[in-house]
Image: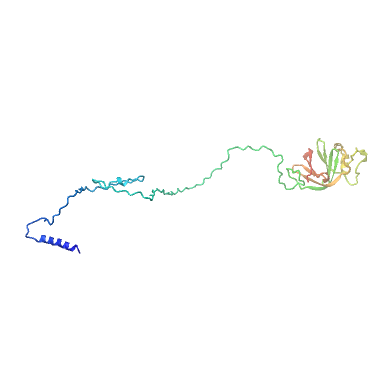
Amino acid sequence: MGRRPFLLVIVTLVVAACGSNGSTETGPRLVQDVTLAPTTPAATRVLSPTPSPVVIPISTSELISPLEVVTIEADFVLVTPTLPPSKTPTQTPTQTQTQTTTPSPTTTVTATATMPQFPTSIVQPVTAIVSNPLPQVCDSTWFFIQPRPASCPMNVPLTSQGSFQQFQSGLMIWVQNQDAIYVMYDTANAPRWEVFSDTFDEGEPEYDPSIGISPSYTWQPRRGFGELWRGNPAVRQRVGWAVIEWEMPYSVNVQTSNDGTIFVSEPPSRGAGVYALMPGGRDWERYAGGF
């Protein structure tokens, strides 16, 4: 309400000035003199053209202080106070590397047949000769365990009634089913062994008293051994007199190998050995405990 009288006074004065047509005065008219007290003259600003904005590149490694940046090209420099450093540390932004997965190229595998690689070193052949090769796989089995021949039997074992007698320089074995007498000599002269047919018949004399008296602890053989011994001087000379008075009956086994060797068993009371008669009468061997 205090401002309205003042505004009305000003409006009335303006209207009166405009309505005085008879006045010859033109131009402004002094309404009130205002005397200004003498003061220090104010600085006169000289406006300069609006400068183009200055673009200051910002470095990521070092920031330029705001005091060194001039925002307006003028006759004076406006200094903007710098705020004190913040107590909260400003985290320096770090560059995060984003790993990009590059798809691997599609690889096509083609199977190619190749020759196997063999060692280049030369293996020397084995020159050692195996003295006891493994026995063959045979259709028939041997009647004895030792020795184990490398050859195979030609037939199954022949089991027969037989008899055995020891002489001064050899021995005789009778095999009833073969009607044969095997003679083995201790001397190295050939043949080392022979086989003869048994020619003795029941009812014939078992020995010959005219042969003479035998040396001490020796006897004249009887029956089939005696008939062969008396009738063949060569056999009698080689084997000598019997060292046991009577022959020993037992169950004898005979088996022939496919290489011609004949295997004959001896009485269990003698050790149950096995005699191996090599082909052609060239040699014979005795293996103890062959059953």
Extreme residue toward the front, this view? 37
Judged left or right of residue 58, residue 153 is right
The part of the image, by quadrant, that contains residue 146 is top right
Front position in the image: 140 or 42: 42
Visible residue check, residue 5: yes
Q: Residue at x 12, y 61 (%)?
A: 13
Q: Position of residue 106 (x, y in %)?
A: 46, 48
Visible residue check, residue 179: no
Which quadrant does the N terminus fall into? bottom left
Judged left or right of residue 119, residue 164 is right
Judged left or right of residue 155, residue 203 is right
Q: Position of residue 87 (x, y in %)?
A: 38, 50
Q: Position of residue 128 (x, y in %)?
A: 68, 37
Front position in the image: 186 or 255: 186
The part of the image, by quadrant, that contains residue 16 is bottom left
Q: Position of residue 66 (x, y in %)?
A: 31, 47
Judged left or right of residue 205, residue 21 is left
